[in-house]
Image (cartoon, rainbow, N blue to C red):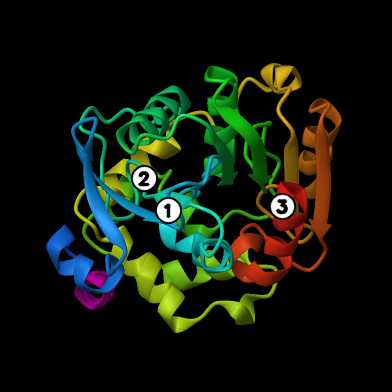
Amino acid sequence: MNLLRSLVLVFVVTAFVFLTAGVAATWAPDRSVDSLSARWATEPSQFLEVSGMRVHVRDEGPRDDPQPIVLLHGTSDSLHTWQGWTEGLRGTRRVIRFDLPGFGLTGPSPNSDYSIKAYVRFVVAVLDKVGVQSFVLGGNSLGGQIAWATALAVPTRVNKLVLVDSAGYPLQPQSVPIGFRLSRIPGVRVLLEFVLPRGVVQSSLQNVYGDSSRVTPEMVDRFYELTLRKGNREALALRMQQPLSGDETKIKSLKVPTLILWGGNDRLIPIENANRFASDIANSRLVVFENLGHVPQEEDAHATLQALKLFLN
């Protein structure tokens, strides 16, 4: 009996030591916007006061462009995902991108509302702030759902629509990034507000790429550090409590010319959803990139940008 107690005690102590060591090794406290801005808010970044938030914005290209291109990122991402597209467009087109509430350097919503309706109001408020009334609107994943919902809410302002591996229909993923799965588990979710293993971030990124070898250390740095922005981890948990699909019956009422870009190797929102968008939106065009994943605009900015330019022209 004494031997059994000793073994149990050794097991408990060992487990405690390993748990303590693990927490210590992955301890990741919140970081301030100022500490992150030196690397992630370089020129031409600016911060605008919108809806009670200090919004991280990049507004580039000629100001006389009658139809600026507005780009919305996806869950846990930031405006940086559109860097390749912006570099290829800003010589002739005005490109506006910003960090959505709960992500990037913009940080959490003051009222903790991460519904699609709240995001639509936010997008309109930002564009009102910069004085843009008519625009081409594009979005990836969550940003795609916000984009088409915005086109329905203010149809006279959205001139063209670009959906890149967009959310909107009920999800039947083949694989979900580990970071998303963990953020839905109540106990783990709370723990992740204090610790963040870098490996979780790297694995999540590799999961959404068609070719995981294209995930660079700098990219992992970006997602890891911006996740640590004060309030973002709690905001992600709240966002994950929201419905992951929209009212798909409304998609059929979209009349705006629409380009649908999709990674054929998207395991989070499979190609079947792309076909549904193409079927439900009458004035649409679908382009599939067979070897790309859930964020094709970043995985291969050049190829996807060529498809966008053809559509815009």
Q: Are marks 1 and 2 in contact (CB under 8 Å)?
A: yes
Residue 79, how many percent across, how many down? 42, 56
**SS for tag 2?**
helix
Using the rendered view, name the quadrant where residue 309 is placed. Answer: bottom right
Residue in the foreground of this view, choosing between 44 and 117? 44
Q: Quadrant of the N terminus?
A: bottom left
Q: Earlier in the sequence, mark 2 or mark 3?
A: 3
Q: Disc 3 designates what residue? A: 174
**SS for tag 3?**
loop
Which residues, given as a range, are shown in magenta? 1-28
**SS for tag 1?**
loop
User: What amino acid is at disc 2?
Assistant: Leu
User: What amino acid is at disc 3?
Assistant: Gln
Residue 172, how many percent across, how many down? 71, 41
Q: Residue at x 78, y 68 (%)?
A: 291
Residue 24, how many percent across, how many down? 19, 75
Q: Disc 1 designates what residue? A: 76
For marks 2 and 3, give the one nearer the viewer.
2
